[in-house]
Every structure is written in structure tokens, then in C-alpha cells.
């Protein structure tokens, strides 16, 4: 088991990002197997341990689904649009579309954002969440870090790094 601090794990997570004409792509190499990663992408009981998306049902079949980051929050649509075996999932997250691909221990997240100019903000948030997922897959009992809590775990530095890397300097203030 790797005992890196969560902040170090988040910062050191092997991540590659790209901005295409119609999407933002984030690739991360994680601990664990494809089967474990798939379960953590689709099972509400596992999603609540690392993700801001906590759906009312498993994300394994197409159809309407609502999600709440926290039980008291207003619901957000995460309708499942498509799945392919246990390696590809496409769903809404509000007005955005997220496509997850699992290949061995590599996760690719393709985000079709309604506000692509804010891609660094989204990428930073997902890197924090994926750092938590990586720790959990490595056997570390790490609590979920979402929302404003991410500010205490390197989110701002990640956002600034990706804003520079993708040449999108005007990010929203938190």
C-alpha cells in the first residue's frame, strides 16, 4: 500500500489533458484493475466514496438518472446515454456530457462542456477526485474530496497549471 499524502498523490497522479474542437480529454493511470475501476464509475455505493456524482441507481443501463453530490443538494441529471460492456459509459452531468473509457488501469474522461473555456476548472476538480479514487484503489481509506474541500488539496494550483497549459487564463474565481 502506498502511503503518499493525498495531496501528493493528487499532484503526482499521471494525467494527460487535451483540448479538442468539441471536447476536453483527461487521461489518468490509476491503481487497481479495469473491473475495480468500472465498479467505481458505475456503482452509487462506490461513487459516493470519491466522486461528486452520486446517482440514485447504478450507471450501467441507459435511461434517466438523478444525482446529488450531497444528500441535501438539489438533484442534477446524470442520464445514462450509452454503455459498452464494462469499459465505456456516456452520461449527462447537468448540461454537460461525460464519456468514460476504461482500458486496463487507464481511465479516459472525454467532457463535452457547455462552457469549454472553463475546462481547467473541471480538469482540476476531476484530478482531485481521481486522486482520491487512486488512493482507494490502492487500499488507502481516503475520504471523498469534493466541492470547496478540494481547495485545501491543491485544486487551485491544478486549475492554474491547466489554464496555462491549455491557454485558457480566464477561469472563474472560487
Image (cartoon, rainbow, N blue to C red):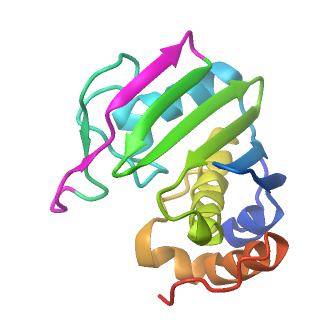
Q: Is residue 164 left or right of residue 71?
A: right
**Residue at the farthest top position:** 85
Q: Is residue 82 left or right of residue 75?
A: right
- Residue 54, x across and y down, in percent: 33, 45
Q: Residue at x 63, y 86 (%)?
A: 170
- Residue 74, x across and y down, in percent: 16, 59
Question: Is 80 drawn above or below residue 2 in the view shown?
Answer: above
Q: Is residue 36 left or right of residue 40?
A: right
Relative depth, front residue between 79 and 50: 79
Relative depth, front residue between 153 and 83: 83
Question: Is 123 drawn above or below residue 169 in the view shown?
Answer: above
Q: Residue at x 61, y 63 (%)?
A: 128
Q: What's the magenta region?
A: 71-86
**Residue at the farthest front position:** 21
Q: Residue at x 49, y 51 (%)?
A: 50
Magenta-colored stretch includes residue 20: no
Amino acid at each position: 500500500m502506498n502511503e503518499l499524502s493525498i495531496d501528493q498523490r493528487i499532484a503526482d497522479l499521471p494525467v494527460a489533458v487535451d483540448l479538442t474542437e468539441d471536447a476536453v480529454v483527461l487521461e489518468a493511470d490509476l491503481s487497481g484493475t479495469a473491473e475495480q475501476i468500472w465498479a467505481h464509475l458505475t456503482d452509487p455505493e462506490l461513487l459516493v466514496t470519491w466522486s461528486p456524482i452520486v446517482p440514485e441507481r447504478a450507471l450501467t443501463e441507459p435511461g434517466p438518472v438523478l444525482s446529488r453530490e450531497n444528500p441535501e443538494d438539489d438533484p442534477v441529471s446524470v442520464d445514462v446515454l450509452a454503455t459498452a460492456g464494462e469499459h465505456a459509459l456516456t452520461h449527462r452531468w447537468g448540461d454537460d456530457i461525460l464519456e468514460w473509457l476504461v482500458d486496463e488501469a487507464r481511465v479516459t474522461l472525454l467532457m463535452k462542456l457547455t462552457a469549454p473555456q472553463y475546462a481547467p476548472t473541471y480538469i482540476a476538480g476531476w484530478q482531485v477526485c481521481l486522486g482520491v479514487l487512486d488512493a482507494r484503489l490502492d487500499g488507502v481509506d481516503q475520504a471523498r474530496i469534493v466541492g470547496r474541500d478540494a481547495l485545501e488539496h491543491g485544486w487551485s494550483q491544478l486549475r492554474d497549471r491547466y489554464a496555462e497549459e491549455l491557454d485558457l487564463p480566464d477561469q472563474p474565481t472560487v
